[in-house]
Structure formats: C-alpha cells, structure tokens
Amino acid sequence: MKKINMTIVLFVLISTLWMATNQTTYAAETNQKGIPVLLYHHILKKSENAFPNDSAIMDFEEFEAQMKYLHDHGFYTATLSDLALYLQGRKALPAKTVVITFDDGHKTNYLYAYPILKKYGFHAGAFLITNRISQTPVPFDPRDLQFLSWPEIKQMTDVFQFASHTNGLHYTIDGKSALLTEPDDVVLKDLKTSKDLVHTEFFAYPFGAYNQKTIEQLKITGYKYAFTTEGKYVKPGDDPYELGRFVITPSTTESNFEQIVNGESSTYGWHKYSGKWYYLDSNGNKWTGWLYSDGHWYYLDQNGAMGTGWIKSGSKWYYLEKNGEMRTGWVNIGQKWYFFYKDGHMAANTVINGYRLGSDGAWQ
C-alpha cells in the first residue's frame, strides 16, 4: 500500500514539475518589452493614390510587403481578445506577436487589407465609426473617402474583430475632439449606440484624444479597453484604458517597421530636452510643423522645438499658449484683443461680431 502511494506521489510531483517547466518556458517566450499594436487607416495602390502626402493613406504595395515580412519571420497576429487575456495574465503569447488594427472603417480595409491578411492566415482589429457604415456596398472610387458596409463587415469576420471608434463623434470643435467637448449625455448616448452596434468592449480614441472624464464615460457604457495613438508597447500592468499603438504611415521605413515589431523601437511622443519640448514620431525623428496631439494643435519649429507665443506659418499668424496649445476665438495679448479663427489663424482687416480688426490683427 505504501509503495503504491509513493508511486502516485512521485507521478504527481513529476507531472507538476513538467507542467510548471513547460508553462514557464512558454511564458518566457512572450516579448518582455510587450506587444506592439500596429495602427493603419486607409490603403490605396500607388497608381490610384491622388493624395500622396496624406499620412493616413498607406500604399497597398508597402502594406503587402510588411505583412509578408511578418509571415516570413513567423509572427503570430493576436486578436483583440487575445490581447485582453494577455493583459489579464491569463494567456501567454509567443515572443513574435503583433496586433494589427485599423481605424475609421475605410472600404479599402475590405478591398485591400482583408485579402492579404486572409492569405497569410492573419487576424486584425478594426475600429469603426459606426454611423458611416452603409447598408449596402458602395462602388469603389479611389478619389473618394469611402467606408465599409454591413454586408462587407459580416464577410470579414473570419479575419477581423470589430470594435468602436464612436458612432458619430469623429470630428473636432474649435480644434478639440468632439469626444471631449460635446455634452455628457451626447457622448454617453454615442458610445452606447456604437457599442451595441458592434457588440464590443474595445474602443479607440478619435485623434488619440482623451482625458479622465472620457475614461469614466467608457466605463459607464461598458467598455473595458481603449487604445491611444501613443507609440508604446502593451504589457500586463498597463492601464487598460491607455493602451499604446504604433501608427504606421508611408514614412515608416522598412528598418523602422522591423524595429517596431521586434520590440526594438523607442517610445515616441513628447520628450523634454534642455527645457524645451520635442515630439518624436514612430521613426524616432523630431516632428516639425503643425501637430495634433491629445485634442490640441501644437507647432514645432524647424529644430523640432515646441513653439509658444506668436508663430507665423506660411503667411498667417497664430498664437500658442505657454503649454504650446493653439488658441482660437478672442484672446487678450499685451492688453490688446485679437480674434483667431477655428483653424487658429489670426483675423485681420475685417470685422468680427461688430468689432473692426486692423492690419496688425488688433481690435481698433
């Protein structure tokens, strides 16, 4: 009897050690830096792209090359649900794991991305602006900004997991995201409508803009995970409402792409050097010119430093606060009143609400 019990004990111990060893090995495979979540928008072939300077439009040929790289190098494409389990510590993922996402719900997600992803056996997530989804497919026109239809979405479910990018709050008011400026009841109704249409717990912030109030609104309406446009890897312990994504644009080089997916990319975004703020893009380069970030417009000079005060861009004048935010509406500067339009440029030689503005823009 004792011999039998000892055999059982030894068997249990050996089995437990074997399982623990295998679980540890598998868990160790997960990228220690975290999972890169890639963000795409619109895709067009080079021959049909009439907007080559639009950073939201990816060349089909480049997208296909990037997907081939992932396939040829053995990457696993996790679903949004896989990522949620990973964040909860309930699922280990291979070291070579990426999450592919698309924002807005462009028709080209179906026309171009879907066949390539299906060819390689990949999965992806798509964050839809649900009030732009049509009941029937529209004829393709590369010169127009077109969106998916519900029949197309149904056909894509073997590859795509669909989520929310609001129902109809993907626009700005005075340079700020509507999600941050519309009344609470409008926002809550919109979030619930979109969630009910796509049956999701995942959300992506329009323009990457959000605040603590936005997070609370997402919680109230039942969302559990939300994605930003901040280039950082996703790992257990991250705030589920502030998950990072790497924005992939036409300027993302082959080397940059490989660094991102292999966990070798530096976190981009705002950085402070010698008392000045700079913004690094996903390639690690300093941003220059106008930048929309977290619901506000900023101007980065030719050296990449964030501008403040009066800024001349082209032939127009703008005014930026000490924190770099672009002003709109009436502003008192140096004991003089100025008016700045919704796009931020100063009004001059005109009458605004009965007030005459001189050639220097100041109220006379």
Image: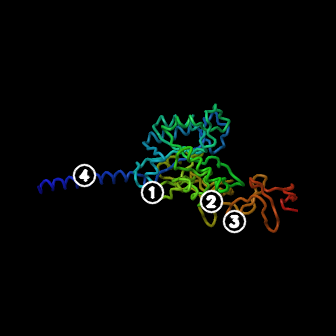
Q: CA distance from mark 1 to mark 3?
A: 36 Å
Pointer 3 or 4: first along the chain: 4
Disc 1 to disc 4: CB gap under 8 Å: no
Q: Residue at label 3?
A: 322
User: Marks 1 and 2: which is nearer the front?
Assistant: 1
Q: Which mark, by number, is residue 121? A: none
Q: CA distance from mark 3 to mark 4?
A: 64 Å
Q: CA distance from mark 1 to mark 2?
A: 28 Å
Above or below, comparing residue 79 to residue 156 in the picture: below
- Viewer-closest of 358 and 258: 358
Q: Residue at label 4?
A: 15
User: Marks 1 and 3: which is nearer the front?
Assistant: 1
Disc 1 to disc 2: CB gap under 8 Å: no
Say what amino acid the circle numbered 1 marks.
Pro
- Viewer-closest of 285 and 127: 127
Q: Quadrant of residue 147?
A: top right
Q: Secondary structure at mark 4?
A: helix
Pointer 1 or 3: first along the chain: 1
- Viewer-closest of 287 and 54: 54
Pointer 2 or 3: first along the chain: 2
User: Marks 2 and 4: which is nearer the front?
Assistant: 4
Q: Residue at label 2?
A: 278
Disc 1 to disc 3: CB gap under 8 Å: no
Q: Secondary structure at mark 1?
A: loop
Say what amino acid the circle numbered 4 marks.
Ser
Pointer 1 or 2: first along the chain: 1
Q: CA distance from mark 2 to mark 3?
A: 14 Å
Residue 257 appears at what percent x and percent y?
52, 46
